[in-house]
Image (cartoon, grey):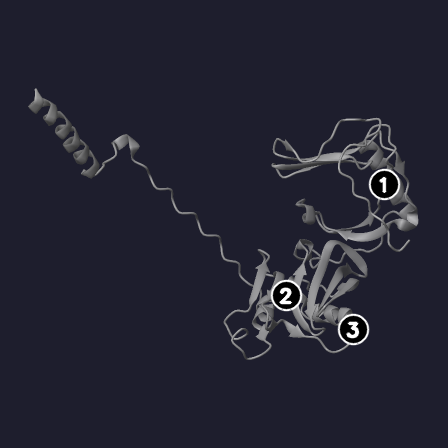
Amino acid sequence: MKRLRLLLPAALIVLLLILVLSPHTPPPSATTVAAPPPEPEPAVEVQPAAAAMIKAVRPLRADSAASRPGGHGTSLHPSGVLHAIGVDPGWTLGTLPPGAVPAAAREFILARRAAWGLHNPRTGLSVLRHRTLPRRDIVRLQQTYGDVPVFAAQFVAHVRDGTEVECVVADQAMTFLALDSAALPLRPQINAAGAVLHAMAAMQREHPLAVLEEPSPDKAALVVYAPGVLGLNGDAELAWEVTVVARPDSPVPEVQLLSNGRYHVMVTNAGGGYSRWKDFAVTRWREDTTCDNWGAFCYIRDVAT
């Protein structure tokens, strides 16, 4: 019996060693098939004007930081024109002449307009804002067509030390507008007063319980609008831009929801609302259509008045 008791543990140890050291071969049913490699994205053919601007990037000084290859980053539209271009420290897109930075930045971009696909001579740029920071100027420019602003089509240029262009970024609308195929008539079919009436009627249909403030016709502005900016089909056309404001004392709160699938935000026309991350409340909120005083509030003051 003693010999049998000793042999049983020894046999178990040998069996375990055989199982551990022997190569494992999965059964046929467990055989996995490797997924096919993803198809490479088609290469974008860079347009000559965009390629010329990229080639013009140069170092500012002959040191180790500026002499390495590259020195720039670009973002291209599928059509091959530029959406954005920027340079690393020690590099420049070009040097502006001395003088007013906003006007010089405007002329710099207009001289290279073809790099962004703006071939029509009726397209132009106007300076919207200019912000001055230590050793940096930020200039925002509005694209125009026959002196009419183009909806959602703006440039932002960063200028270092008042002369060196460091970065130029364009809105997506800059390369989606079909303004080169035909001349766009710049005479509106209705006047500003008629545009306000149409806007008020459309808002009342969409929000029948809202208390709307009718804007003054002189606040309406003409814009060139391209449906492609919002992913719709159609040609660019002339339109009126009218802002209709809903008053906060409506009988029932007007609600706007925004979410990316994980983080959710709700805000009412009175300023109430909540934010939630998945199933967790970030701010406390209680439904109250009478007071509508729950939520996190932001107060904005006009420093000029």
**Residue at the bottom extreme, as displayed:** 62
Locate residue 62 relative to residue 14 in the image: left or right: right
> Which amino acid lies under the numbered mark 2 shown in the image of this protein?
Ala
Residue 243 is situated, as x and y percent measured from the top left of the image, at 84, 45
Q: Mark 3 — residue?
A: 100
Which of disc 1 and disc 3 is earlier in sequence?
Answer: 3
- Taking the spot 74% from the left edge, 64% from the top edge, the residue there is 139
The reply to whether dot 1 and dot 2 touch (C-beta < 8 Å) is: no
The answer, for residue 256, to whether it is visible in the render is no
Q: State how far apart marks 2 and 3 are (Cα).
A: 24 Å
> Which amino acid lies under the numbered mark 1 shown in the image of this protein?
Val
Residue 71 is situated, as x and y percent measured from the top left of the image, at 55, 69
Residue 131 is situated, as x and y percent measured from the top left of the image, at 76, 63
Characterize the local packing of mark 3: few (<14), some (14-19) or many (20 or more) Cα atoms within 10 angstroms: few
Which of disc 3 and disc 2 is earlier in sequence?
Answer: 3
As displayed, is residue 268 above or below residue 118? above
